Amino acid sequence: MDTLVFDIETQNFFTDAGVGRDNFEALKISVVGMYSYNQGKYFCFEESEMRAAADLFEGSSRIVGFSINRYDVPVLQAYFNRFKEGAKPDLWQKERVDLLKEIEMATGSRISLSKVAEANLGAGKDKKGAEAPELFRAGKIAELKEYCLKDVRLTKEIYDLYRKQGFLMVPERGTGKLLKIVFTTMAIPSARLF
């Protein structure tokens, strides 16, 4: 079974008119970017291609992302649940590695993907997530896909780094002091601070 690193972008957000807080059913996907370890390549699917994305998810046993439990998985699962025919992957039943959740459990605070990437890879994001709906509305789909896939690449590189070395450096909230977070197992069920 495959391991997929993924990220989604949406056409709208909870603060948009008619959506409402935590109304995942009302969010519309613009693109889903992912990396397949089995295939060794990146993919980016538009909303009209959700069946192809679902097929990749169906063939995976582990999914990896940054804040996927709070956003990406609920939005995608709502899409998959609407399928009339074919496989409906249940993302909640997959082994999930949510890097932000694990960092939050270890440090007690949330941090951006960009800051984690800067601390561990030397480079962060060049855009903010709030810009993704604007890119979609402006019809800049190629730029939107590039943005989404950059997030996937950063997440994959962070995941690969933690698997290789067993720890990540995370800036402390408020001070910016780098904390070394040592993950005790491959699936990151617990972490220690040093």
Image: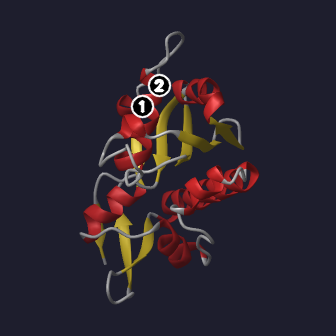
Read off the residue under disc 1. 77
Read off the residue under disc 2. 80
Q: Position of residue 23 (x, y in %)?
A: 33, 41
Question: In the figure, 108 relative to 25: above or below?
Answer: below
Residue 9 placement, left or right of 193: right
Residue 86 placement, left or right of 110: right
Label 2 residue SS: helix
Q: What's the amino acid at mark 1?
A: Gln
Give the residue displayed 32% in from the left and 81% down from the top: 173
Count the marks: 2
Give the residue displayed 30% in from the left and 64% down from the top: 104
Q: Nearer the viewer, residue 51 or 92?
A: 51
Residue 174 visible in the shown view = yes
How far apart are labels 1 and 2 at the CA level? 5 Å
- Which quadrant of the view contains residue 45? top right
In the picture as drawn, the residue positioned furthest to the front comes out as 17
Q: Position of residue 172 (x, y in %)?
A: 34, 81
Q: Position of residue 136 (x, y in %)?
A: 63, 50
In the picture as drawn, the residue positioned furthest to the top comes out as 85
Q: Nearer the viewer, residue 16 or 194?
A: 16
In the picture as drawn, the residue positioned furthest to the right comes out as 142
Question: In the figure, 10 relative to 147: above or below?
Answer: above
Which numbered marker is on residue 140?
none
Q: Residues within 10 Å of mark 1 (few under 14, many from 20)?
A: some
Give the residue displayed 59% in from the left and 58% down from the top: 134
The answer to whether marks 1 and 2 mark residues whose Cβ atoms lie closer than 8 Å is yes
Q: What's the amino acid at mark 2?
A: Phe
Q: Nearer the viewer, residue 193 or 98?
A: 98
Residue 95 visible in the shown view = no
Q: Position of residue 122 (x, y in %)?
A: 61, 78
